[in-house]
Image (tube, rainbow, N blue to C red):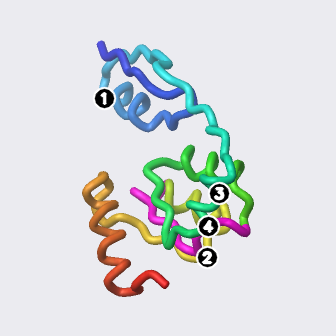
Amino acid sequence: KVLLCTAEETRDVLTEGLRARGWQVDVAIAYRTVPAAVDRALLEAIAAADVVAFASSSAVNGFAAAVPRDRWPRVAAAIGPISAATARSAGFAEVIEANRHDIGGLVDTIVDWSVKAPPA
């Protein structure tokens, strides 16, 4: 038996995968993602950024809902294919995706991108 602690908004991939392999899975919502308020200083920092990094689709969606599009950096860096697809759907001009879908992979992707296309 597995107790899966998860976000309120999550995909069921892990739950379904475990159940398909015979595990009994109880799901407990452990946290809820709540959008942060965006003040003027944060908007200025966003507008000055060369790239914005996302480790989840909910982060992309929260950013897109809270930040006026004219303030977005041209490039979004995504930790994996799901968050990359969400960033593309949101309307980022360029989306780079980590080859390794973890934080280290995301860092490496941003560094590699900056070498190939140095910040303005």
x and y, in percent, of residue 117 in the image: 41, 86
Query: At numbered mark 4, what does the secondary structure look like: helix, strand or loop?
Result: helix
* 13 or 35, nearer to the observer: 35
- Callout 3–callout 4 Cβ contact below 8 Å: yes
x and y, in percent, of residue 9 in the image: 57, 32
For marks 2 and 3, give the one nearer the viewer.
Answer: 3
The residue carrying mark 3 is 43
Task: State yes or no: residue 81 in magenta.
Answer: yes
Q: Residues within 10 Å of mark 3 (few under 14, many from 20)?
A: some
The quadrant of the picture occupied by the N terminus is top left
Q: As shown in the figure, which amino acid type bears the numbered disc 2?
A: Ala
- Callout 2–callout 3 Cβ contact below 8 Å: no
Q: What numbered label is drawn on residue 93?
A: 2
First in sequence: mark 2 or mark 3?
3
x and y, in percent, of residue 97 in the image: 41, 67
For the record, the magenta segment spans 70-82
